[in-house]
Amino acid sequence: MPAKPQTLEDAFVEELRDLYDAEKQLIKALPKMAKAAHAEQLREAFREHLEVTKTQAQRLERIFEMLGQKARSKPCKGMKGLLEEGQEIIEEDAGAQENIADLDLIAAAQKVEHYEISGYGTARTFAQAIGQKDAAQLLDETAKEEGEADKKLTQLAKTLYKEAFKAQRGGVRSMGNGSSRPRRVRAGEEQAAQA
């Protein structure tokens, strides 16, 4: 069983190790997410975020170095769970309507982004509390990048929602009365139709 953190510095390093593992897991997962995406914009967003994620992992390595610590990770169970959920979505959505499958992928990706925003915000606050201004600045930079990624995913989702809605409306069959909605039966008509 690993030693429990005894100081704020120890707790900060543990948080960094968790984040480092999360980034390493994400570096492996993003290519799979890009491959599963149907919309070119979404594939490109995942590819772009892969490069950003690699930079973020390097930034963590710099922070470890600043602290005189070896860049080591500890298993991040939170990220593992989120990525497993994303893999389930990829498997379950195989053959689904493309916009819907992409929207599900975006939902999974945004859960990851929110997890990272929270983790980097916590680490930044630790760094500030123990007087590690340079580390806090680097962590803040990453938190902002994660926020931007989340906003980008939201904008993509809005576009895909519109496209999915149009496709869905275009795919509704006529109900035989010149309308795509069922016609209301007026009082008395039902009895007349049965007679």
Image: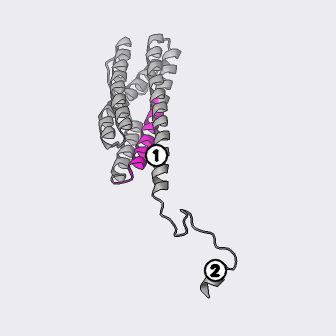
- Using the image, determine if residue 149 lies above or below residue 187: above
Label 1 sits on what residue type?
Glu
In depth, the one of 190 and 43 nearer the eye is 190
Q: Position of residue 45 (x, y in %)?
A: 38, 32
Label 2 residue SS: helix
Q: Is residue 111 magenta?
A: yes
The prevailing secondary structure element of the residues shown in magenta is: helix
Residue lying at the far front of the rendered structure: 178
Decide whether residue 44 is among the magenta residues: no
Q: Which residues are magenta?
A: 95-116
Q: Which mark is residue 115?
A: none
x and y percentages locating residue 144 in the rendered image: 48, 23
Above or below, 24 relative to 66:
below
- Other residues around mark 2 within 10 Å, as few (<14) / some (14–19) / many (≥20): few
Q: What amino acid is at disc 2?
A: Glu
For the residue pair 70 and 95, the one nearer the viewer reads as 95
Image point 33% across, 27% down: which residue?
73
- In terms of sequence position, does the residue under pointer 2 or pointer 1 come before the other? 1
Location of mark 2 (residue): 190
Q: Residue at x 48, y 19 (%)?
A: 140
Around disc 1, counting alpha carbons within 10 Å, would you say few (fewer than 14), some (14 to 19), or many (20 or more)? some
Query: Among all residues in the image, which is located at the extreme bottom?
Result: 195
Q: Residue drawn at (47%, 63%), measured in percent from left and top?
A: 173
Determine which quarter of the picture holds residue 19.
top left
Q: Is residue 191 left or right of residue 42?
A: right
Q: Quadrant of residue 189?
A: bottom right
Q: CA distance from mark 2 to mark 1?
A: 38 Å
Q: How is the image coloured?
A: one colour
**Above or below 23: residue 67:** above
Pointers 2 and 1 in contact (CB under 8 A)? Answer: no
**Image spot of residue 44 (x, y percent):** 35, 33
- Mark 1 lies on residue: 163
